[in-house]
Image (spheres, grey):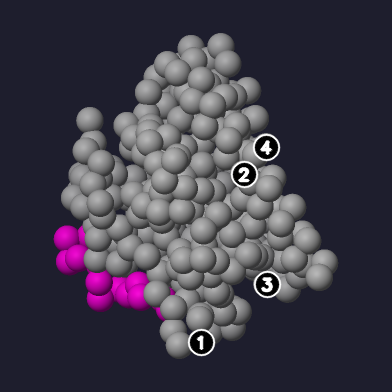
């Protein structure tokens, strides 16, 4: 069992309130650099014509990598949508020869999606605020600046109801323990980050790290601190009993949905003023 620890990183803002990207290749511990370099070369060799650019995010470029626990989080921008077969080949890249890395996670989008000016795009935010350029043409200088505002919060809040409904649907009658645990981790991370999003504007900051997100939320909702702490426990130590997860979603999950709906109503009114 992984012990819950008060570790993580919150985004800093400059004097104008814009998020500052504090990630860098220099912060990647020498232990992990050969793995990152090898994976970048494999992507370039196997998918070069399809790829516009690749970025590293997560714990490694913030100097927080933990041997055997950290994975390599990559943001991949493509020229055109990838076929299912190509997506499968990309997702199949692993670091099996490097036991210090827990795995590889990809987030993929097209260049056109990323540069769509009329809507917020989370991968654009991740590249600008969390990313380190590894390959291709660097988009970071031309991406917009981001602030801890309602637009960022809305991206985490607006879909939480549908996501919880989907999780419950996947969990009901599920007899695959690994699938249940994956679903448990997935939905708890979304709930924790949704809770953090409720307070982004007041706190004027942002974090992807679960413990810090839990702390930010609990400072504004002390009456829900125990439930959010349980969500963090479920996220890092998922259970294989689908009914246990469903019970939690039917309780605290329902409260999160109600609070999300209230938040959306308040901010629609503010937009209309």
Relative to 25, 208 lies left or right: right
Quick one: label 4 or label 3, which is nearer the N terminus?
3
Crowding at dot 2, Cα within 10 Å, few <14 / some 14-19 / many 20+, comes out as some
Q: Earlier in the sequence, mark 1 or mark 3?
A: 1
Mark 3 closeness class: few <14, some 14–19, many ≥20 residues within 10 Å: some
State the residue position of label 4: 162
Q: Looking at the rendering, which quadrant does residue 59 occupy?
A: bottom left
Residue 176 drawn at (x, y percent): 46, 16
Percent position of residue 225, x then y: 40, 41
Is residue 220 part of the magenta span, yes or no? Answer: no
Quote the CA–CA distance across marks 4 and 2: 14 Å
Query: What whole-number distance in Å separates the C-alpha atoms at marks 2 and 3?
Result: 31 Å
Please indicate whether residue 101 sits to the left or right of residue 152 in the image: left
User: Along the horizontal axis of the image, is 15 left or right of 86?
Assistant: left
In the foreground, 137 or 129: 129
5 up-or-down from 152: above or below: above
Q: In the image, what residue occupies the spot 63% across and 39% down? A: 257
40 vs 167: above or below: below
Residue designated by label 1? 16
Q: Nearer the viewer, residue 269 or 193?
A: 269
The residue labelled by disc 3 is: 115
Q: Nearer the viewer, mark 4 or mark 2?
A: 2
């Amino acid at each position: 069992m992984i012990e819950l620890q008060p570790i993580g990183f919150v985004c800093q803002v400059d004097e104008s309130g814009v998020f500052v990207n504090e990630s860098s290749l220099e912060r990647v511990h020498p232990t992990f650099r050969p793995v990152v370099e090898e994976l970048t070369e494999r992507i370039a060799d196997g998918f070069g014509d399809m790829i516009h650019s690749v970025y590293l995010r997560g714990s490694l470029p913030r100097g927080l990598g933990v041997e055997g626990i950290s994975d390599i989080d990559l943001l991949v921008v493509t020229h055109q949508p990838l076929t299912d077969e190509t997506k499968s080949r990309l997702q199949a890249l692993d670091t099996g020869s490097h036991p210090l890395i827990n795995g590889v996670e990809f987030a993929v989008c097209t260049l056109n999606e990323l540069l769509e000016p009329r809507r917020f795009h989370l991968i654009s935010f991740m590249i600008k605020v969390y990313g380190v350029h590894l390959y291709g043409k660097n988009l970071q200088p031309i991406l917009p600046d981001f602030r801890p505002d309602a637009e960022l919060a809305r991206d985490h809040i607006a879909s939480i109801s549908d996501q919880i409904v989907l999780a419950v649907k996947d969990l009901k009658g599920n007899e695959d323990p690994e699938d249940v645990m994956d679903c448990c981790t997935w939905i708890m991370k979304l709930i924790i980050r949704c809770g953090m999003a409720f307070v982004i504007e007041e706190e004027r900051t942002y974090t992807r790290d679960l413990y810090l997100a839990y702390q930010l939320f609990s400072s504004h909702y002390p009456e829900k601190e125990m439930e959010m702490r349980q969500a963090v426990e479920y996220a890092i130590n998922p259970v294989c009993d689908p009914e246990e997860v469903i019970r939690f979603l039917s309780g605290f999950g329902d409260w999160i949905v109600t609070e999300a709906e209230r938040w959306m109503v308040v901010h629609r009114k503010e937009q209309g003023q």
